[in-house]
């Protein structure tokens, strides 16, 4: 199963569970008992939080794909230059070398979303997903604040 398919399956399950929670919340509130009303209200809050996280994830994926397409059109996507073991795993020393280079590029150009995009890819290759996501969010923010270029 691809990650995209897995995402859609889990999103569907999340939405189904959200609907079930809302239905149970309505029934609990309908009991008229203070405890039932309290739990019923909580049953409304939990799906809202889940749907908010789902929305943020979709937005992040859409925005990072948009940056990747733009960078590809410019010919600036990072090339996979990592060495791999015979089993196909990324060689740690190779990932560290590429990461150091990408970090230096980002430090030299702190306002360039392209450098931070490539740094995010290097973080992901090095296995540091939380920093990769945070760096990609920074690249998205830099891209959104970049003045529009004229095509003339």
Image: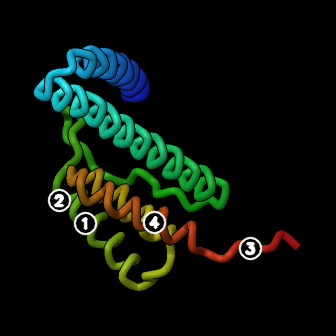
The quadrant of the picture occupied by the C terminus is bottom right
| Disc 2 + disc 1, Cβ < 8 Å | yes
Q: Earlier in the sequence, mark 2 or mark 3?
A: 2
Say left or right for 75 vs 58: right
**Quick check: 27 left or right of 59?**
left
Q: Secondary structure at mark 3?
A: loop
Task: Name the quadrant of the N terminus.
Answer: top left
Disc number for residue 139: 4
Q: Could you tell which of marks 4 and 3 lies nearer the N-terminus?
A: 4
Q: Residue at x 57, y 73 (%)?
A: 145
Q: In the rendered structure, which disc, 2 or 4, sits on the residue that comes first in sequence? A: 2
Q: Quadrant of residue 24?
A: top left
Identify the residue position indicated by label 1 in the image. Answer: 97
Up-down relation of residue 18 to residue 81 (above or below): above
Element marked by disc 2: helix
The residue lying toward the viewer, choosing from 37 and 83, is: 37
Label 1, label 4: how far apart the Cα atoms are: 21 Å
For the point 28% across and 65% down, which residue is it? 99
Task: Give the alpha-carbon distance from disc 2 to disc 1, as whole Å.
Answer: 6 Å
The mark nearer the N terminus, 3 or 1, is: 1
- Residue 48, image x, y percentages: 34, 37
What residue do we see at 50% from left, 76% from top? 112
Looking at the picture, how far across and down is residue 88, in whole percent? Answer: 24, 35
Locate residue 37, reporting x and y percent: 20, 27
* Sequence order check, earlier mark of 1 and 4: 1
Label 2, label 3: how far apart the Cα atoms are = 38 Å
- The tag on residue 149 is 3
Q: Give the residue at mark 2.
A: 93
User: In this orientation, does residue 6 appear?
Assistant: no
Horizontal relation, residue 55 to residue 99: left or right: right
Label 1 packing within 10 angstroms: few (<14), some (14-19), many (20+): few
Above or below residue 71? Residue 50 is: above
């Amino acid at each position: 199963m691809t990650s995209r398919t897995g995402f859609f399956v889990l999103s569907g399950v999340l939405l189904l569970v959200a609907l079930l929670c809302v239905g149970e919340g309505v029934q609990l509130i309908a009991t008229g008992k203070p405890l039932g009303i309290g739990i019923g209200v909580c049953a409304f809050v939990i799906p809202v939080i889940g749907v908010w996280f789902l929305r943020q994830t979709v937005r992040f994926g859409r925005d990072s794909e948009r940056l990747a397409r733009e960078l590809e059109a410019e010919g600036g996507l990072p090339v996979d230059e990592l060495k791999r073991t015979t089993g196909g795993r990324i060689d740690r020393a190779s990932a560290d070398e590429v990461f150091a280079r990408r970090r230096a590029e980002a430090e030299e150009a702190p306002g360039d979303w392209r450098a931070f995009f490539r740094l995010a890819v290097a973080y992901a290759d090095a296995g540091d997903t939380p920093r990769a996501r945070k760096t990609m969010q920074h690249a998205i923010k830099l891209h959104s604040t970049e003045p529009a270029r004229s095509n003339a």
